[in-house]
Amino acid sequence: MHIIRKTFGEMDNNCYILFDRDGGEAYIIDPGYEAKKIEAVIRKHRLCVQGILATHHHYDHTDACEQLRKDLGTCVFMSGKDAKHYKGTVDRLLSEGDVLKIGEEVLRVIETPGHTDGGLSFLCDTSKCIFTGDTLFSTDTGYAIFETGSPDDMERSVKKISTLLSDDYVVWPGHEENATMAFIRRHNRDFMEYVQGIHPAHTKMDPESIRKSQ
């Protein structure tokens, strides 16, 4: 499976385009910005987009969804809980255990709430990679104190990811660089704390103070 990462916006959001071959099927994950630039990649590789996958509803991951949906004639996929907060059209609701295919690759839908109560990750066992949105980054984890976020949910989601993935899996996050689980287990303090049942210090921060600093 081919993975193209494009980083856009003031928060350096990662948008991913997954496909098995030029001219083949594709999925777009978390297009928050720059619909036209994403469409240019689709045209370059002559891809047939099967859907747009949103790890969660926040604008920096979804603002280009509606335009891409219309321009490419495709569908938006999201969890039911997060779809309630999304202002565009959601064509299919995803939940734990759903599967999507790109050629021979299978994308498994994994529910990973914490940053939002409907957060999703997309796990590809053949390619040994996972797309985690704002659940797990290379060096930390997403905030769990906004809106429907929950540190308890984030702890459960991080533990789930840790159980599912061996060290050779690669995490492709919503922000920051990709990293192996081996790297994360050695260097990601938030991850290590959650696995031990400890909630990182930022789970006790005032959400408004974080918004003002961004």
Image (spheres, grey):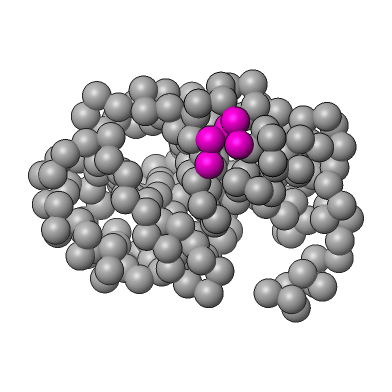
Which quadrant of the view contains residue 68? bottom left
Q: Give the residue drawn at x 31%, y 68%.
A: 35
Quadrant for the N terminus in the image: top left
Q: Is residue 83 visible?
A: no
Left or right placement of residue 113 versus residue 38 in this view: right
Depicted 2 relative to depicted 41: above or below: above
Viewer-proximal residue among 81 and 55: 55
Q: Is residue 4 visible?
A: yes
Q: Which residues are magenta?
A: 179-183
Left or right placement of residue 18 versus residue 117 in this view: left
Q: Give the residue drawn at x 80%, y 66%.
A: 207
Depicted 90 relative to depicted 87: above or below: above
Overall secondary structure of the magenta section: helix
Viewer-proximal residue among 108 and 7: 7
Residue 50, position in %: x, y? 25, 43
Residue 30, position in %: x, y? 44, 54
Q: Give the residue drawn at x 76%, y 35%.
A: 192
